[in-house]
Amino acid sequence: MSELEKLNDADLVMMRRVLEAADSLAAEGVHPFAAMLVDGDGNVVMEQGNAYLPDQDMTGHAERVLMTRASKTWRPDYLAKCTMYVSAEPCCMCAGAAYWAGLGRLVYGLSEHQLKMITGNHPENPTLDLPCRQVFASGQREVEVIGPVLEREAAKVHETFWQNHGV
């Protein structure tokens, strides 16, 4: 079974919801990265937008902040049954946070490679072109990764946002 065949209708609903959140962030002038944590029963248990503003925190990526919050709330055995849906593929910092928190499954929209093609070397987002699969493969436990999913839709918000913010 290919990874995209592992997607179900609920996955697509959640991906569209996280992409809508990214669109909303962009409309507010916030970096358009959104993350959502869903438990094993399909309930959204936590959401997070990019936290770069207001303090210009370069580590305030939505996925990293979400995983830090989740790790403080639940133990790894609970998070192993959860899926994190993200508008863009986690960078190596965010993938590391997901790994250390104990996340079991990840579904992402825009690939890190495509994000780098869109943002270039923007000072607010000097994207690393390092697939999260490579980060997870370096670990001692498996994290299921599905993506890119709805990549064209996920790219649109970034193309508009970064073009309007100096790319």
Image (spheres, helix red, strand yellow):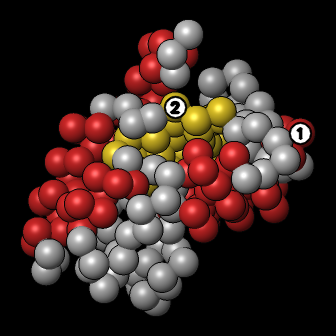
Camera-side residue of 9 and 138: 138
- Amino acid tagged 1: Asp
The residue where tag 2 is placed is 146
Please, which residue is most extreme toward the bottom here? 55
Task: Please name the residue shown 12% across and 59% down the image.
Answer: 160
- Amino acid tagged 2: Ile
Residue 29 tag number = none
Task: Please name the residue shown 44% across and 78% down the image.
Answer: 52
Task: Please name the residue shown 28% across and 44% down the image.
Answer: 154
Q: Position of residue 44 (x, y in %)?
A: 60, 36
Q: Residues within 10 Å of mark 1 (few under 14, many from 20)?
A: few
The residue where tag 1 is placed is 77
Does residue 66 sit above or below 57 in this rendering?
A: above
Q: Position of residue 61 (x, y in %)?
A: 50, 68
The N terminus sits in image quarter? top right
Task: Please name the residue shown 29% across and 38% down the image.
Answer: 151
Does residue 24 sit above or below 153 in this rendering?
A: below
**In the picture provided, is 31 more to the left or to the right than 47?**
left
